Image (cartoon, rainbow, N blue to C red):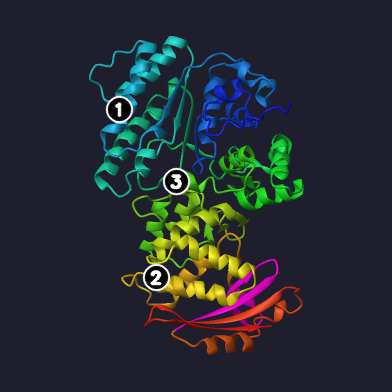
């Protein structure tokens, strides 16, 4: 009888994961690095569902001396006394913080438990003073310095971006709470915080000038997520099962996993990282599907893109400096930094000469889900089903029927709400780009050729489409430009069939007016 593999989907408790004999990708070598470094205060930012909570749980049981849970793991072979330290873990991911009192509830429940454990009288002290008293009492009662773990330290801030009064309330309360990390330093063995970003201009850590931010560290690049090596060594049975379920080869299964869930990178020299939530769900269900996108909608990103009228053709493949990414200003969020911190952009390359990162969308799962989410908001399509238009358009391009694909695009644009501005070529390109750059279509914009740049090029396994877009122009002019600029010349030797398409969009009718298709 085949043994059932338990993937522990959504499990964030290390003890439960180990006792239930679930798959665990060993990250305990990073504990060894942390305890042997000279640093006491750590901060790590990663996107949601990347294993931050599980790593904190692993730290908790390690410092509680639960060696039996670490049998066979890297840290079990290291020289460690395995004595029990007092661990104070604050999980701020348990509430949405819709009103100011919710943080008080979370802290009060935790502090009451710790006060009872360490013999502290609460009185009418502030939460900051209560926390200070708990830290000191835990040290004095156990004779060992305290380990403090804070999960999603910024959740109350992220949940109140558009509520200035709440945002300031939570900022002040968290700042005073975290000030204990410095004032109680003599009682502290380790502080480890996780979150989305080390926000600038909010002064949450203004007193903690020795906080070691390992978010972009090469040394800790793989601390969360799953590397290619870990996939092959620890999860190969699941890959074989995926291949069998889909009647394909193991090599093809690895290729599909890489295309859909790999591609994250968090440091200059870091490995490519698989999204662990999506990867494990896929192996558990033996099905390539959207998993990560279903765990949350990027409303804040959509609002930031619309606020700055971002050109979507340029927003997902760009260069920026490290300073642009390391401090996110939530009072006026930059879309690029926001998309990086939340996992919709990732590092693809680093250029030391200019201290710049090349950022792009990590993989097909993120692209598919994000663009489908943005589409109805960005162009406000009302009378046509977005999903149907996308499916029909993709199918037509894949089957080599460009006329049907363009009819679908025309129907889509006819359904745009007339209250939306479609008053320039940029908006038209954005809408067209969102529809074409989806999973199933390999679409590129501004593709350089020796004589100019192609507006949009779509490639499928059997067809290539060279598309020129004209805003209040003529389709004939677009086709003539393709011919005169010889945009198709680099693809003449390609075995795939090539179509040239000139498209005319009318600002008066706010629709695709006409198109011309020429087969090469």
The magenta span reads 447-471
- Looking at the picture, how far across and down is residue 185, in whole percent? 43, 25
- Looking at the picture, how far across and down is residue 43, in whole percent? 49, 37
Dominant SS type (magenta) = strand
* Mark 3 and mark 1 residues within 8 Å of each other at the beta carbon: no
Q: Is residue 345 visible?
A: no
Q: Quick check: 61 left or right of 187? A: right
Location of mark 3 (residue): 296
Q: Is residue 461 above or below residue 64?
A: below
- The picture quadrant where one finds residue 110 is top left
The secondary structure type at the circle numbered 2 is loop
Task: Give the Cα separation between the discs numbered 3 and 1.
Answer: 24 Å
Disc on the earlier residue, 3 or 2: 3
- Within 10 Å of disc 2 (Cα), the crowding (few <14, some 14-19, many 20+) is some
Q: Which part of the image, by quadrant, shows the C terminus?
A: bottom right
Instruction: Name the mark on residue 415.
Output: 2
Q: Which part of the image, by quadrant, shows the N terminus?
A: top right
* Mark 3 and mark 2 residues within 8 Å of each other at the beta carbon: no
Disc on the earlier residue, 3 or 1: 1
Q: Nearer the viewer, residue 194 or 503?
A: 503
């Amino acid at each position: 009888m085949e043994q059932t593999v338990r993937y522990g989907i959504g499990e964030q408790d290390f003890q439960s994961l180990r006792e239930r004999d679930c798959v665990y990708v060993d990250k305990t070598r990073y504990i060894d690095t942390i305890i042997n470094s000279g640093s006491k205060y750590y901060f790590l930012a990663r996107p949601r569902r990347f294993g931050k909570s599980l790593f904190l749980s692993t730290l908790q049981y390690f410092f509680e001396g639960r060696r039996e849970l670490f049998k066979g793991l890297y840290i079990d072979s290291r020289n460690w006394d395995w004595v029990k330290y007092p661990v104070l873990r604050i999980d701020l991911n348990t509430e949405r913080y819709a009103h100011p009192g919710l943080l008080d509830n979370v802290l009060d429940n935790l502090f009451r438990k710790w006060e009872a454990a360490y013999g502290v009288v609460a009185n009418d002290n502030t939460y900051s003073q209560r926390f200070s008293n708990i830290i000191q009492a835990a040290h004095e009662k156990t004779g060992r310095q305290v380990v403090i773990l804070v999960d999603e330290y910024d959740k109350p801030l992220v949940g109140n971006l558009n509520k200035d009064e709440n945002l300031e309330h939570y900022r002040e309360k968290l700042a005073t709470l975290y000030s204990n990390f410095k004032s109680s330093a003599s009682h502290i063995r380790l502080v480890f915080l996780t979150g989305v970003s080390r926000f600038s201009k909010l002064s949450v850590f203004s007193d903690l000038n020795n906080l070691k931010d390992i978010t972009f560290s090469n040394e800790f690049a793989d601390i969360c997520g799953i590397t290619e090596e870990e996939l092959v060594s620890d999860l190969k049975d699941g890959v074989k099962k995926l291949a069998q379920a889909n009647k394909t080869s193991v090599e093809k299964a690895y290729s599909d996993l890489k295309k859909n869930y790999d591609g994250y990178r968090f440091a200059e020299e870091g490995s490519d990282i698989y999204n662990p939530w999506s990867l494990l769900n896929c192996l558990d269900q033996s099905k390539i599907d959207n998993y990560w996108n279903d765990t949350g909608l990027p409303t804040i990103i959509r609002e930031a893109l619309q606020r700055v009228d971002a050109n979507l053709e340029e927003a997902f493949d760009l260069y920026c400096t490290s300073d642009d990414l390391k401090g996110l200003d939530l009072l006026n969020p930059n879309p690029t930094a926001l998309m990086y911190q939340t996992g919709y952009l990732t590092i693809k390359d680093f250029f030391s000469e200019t201290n710049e990162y090349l950022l792009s969308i990590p993989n097909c799962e993120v692209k598919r889900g994000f663009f489908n989410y943005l589409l109805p908001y960005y162009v406000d399509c009302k009378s046509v089903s977005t999903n149907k238009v996308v499916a029909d358009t993709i199918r037509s391009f894949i089957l080599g029927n460009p006329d049907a694909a363009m009819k679908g695009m025309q129907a889509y644009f006819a359904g745009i709400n007339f209250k939306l501005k479609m008053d320039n070529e940029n908006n038209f390109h954005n809408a067209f780009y969102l529809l074409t750059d989806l999973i199933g279509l390999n679409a590129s914009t501004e593709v350089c050729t020796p004589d100019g740049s192609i507006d949009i090029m779509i490639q499928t396994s059997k067809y290539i489409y060279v598309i020129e877009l004209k805003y209040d122009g003529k389709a004939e002019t677009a086709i003539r430009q393709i011919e005169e600029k010889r945009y198709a010349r680099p693809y003449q030797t390609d075995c795939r069939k090539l179509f040239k398409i000139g498209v005319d969009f009318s600002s008066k009718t706010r629709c695709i007016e006409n198109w011309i298709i020429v087969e090469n």
